[in-house]
């Protein structure tokens, strides 16, 4: 399946990617948490992580904070996160 993403901060840019395969189990996996920089986003993703740990026996988590809600994670930070985690959650908060 292909998803097209448009970036509203500039003129529309078509971007597509393939969805990652879902793991059969979360047990022992490392969760990536992406805090988008909005108020309470850090609180939200930490709560999500705690609940997922309770339900699925995650091995750990790594939190990354975006510079601002309107910007992407810098490329090197995104690559670093991808190398260190098995699954990721991006959260919002207002």
Image (cartoon, rainbow, N blue to C red):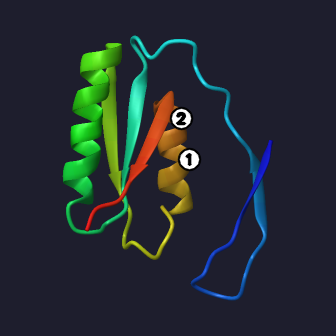
Q: Residue furthest bottom?
A: 11
Residue drawn at point x = 27 percent, y = 58 percent: 41
Q: Is residue 5 left or right of residue 61?
A: right
Crowding near pointer 2: few (<14 within 10 Å), some, many (20+)?
A: few
Residue 9 screen position, x and y as percent: 57, 84
Screen quadrant of the C terminus: bottom left
Residue at image x 47%, y 38%? 88
Q: Residue at x 78, y 57 (%)?
A: 16
Instruction: Give coordinates of residue 17: x percent, y percent.
Output: 75, 50
| Residue 74: x %, y % from top left | 50, 63
Residue 13 versus residue 1: which sits nearer the camera? 1
Marks 1 & 2, CB-CB < 8 Å contact: yes
Is residue 43 depicted above or below 94 in this figure? above
Q: Secondary structure at mark 2?
A: helix
* Above or below 72: residue 45: above
Q: Is residue 12 left or right of residue 53?
A: right
Q: Residue at x 68, y 72 (%)?
A: 6
Q: Which mark is residue 25?
A: none
Instruction: Determine whether, in the image, residue 28 is placed left or right of residue 55.
Output: right
Judge the density around disc 1: few (<14), some (14-19), many (≥20) Cα neighbours within 10 Å. few
Q: Which mark is residue 79?
A: 1
Name the quarter where the N terminus is drawn. top right
Q: Which residue is mark 2?
A: 83
Residue 60's place in the image compared with 32, above or below, is above
């Amino acid at each position: 399946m292909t998803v097209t993403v448009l970036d509203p901060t500039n003129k529309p840019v078509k971007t597509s990617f393939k969805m990652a395969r879902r793991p059969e189990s979360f047990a022992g996996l490392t969760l990536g948490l992406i805090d988008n920089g909005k108020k309470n986003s850090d609180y939200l993703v930490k709560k999500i992580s705690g609940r997922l740990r309770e339900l699925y026996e995650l091995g750990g988590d790594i939190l990354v904070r975006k510079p601002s809600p309107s910007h992407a994670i810098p490329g090197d930070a995104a690559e670093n996160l991808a190398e260190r985690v098995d699954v990721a959650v991006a959260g919002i908060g207002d």
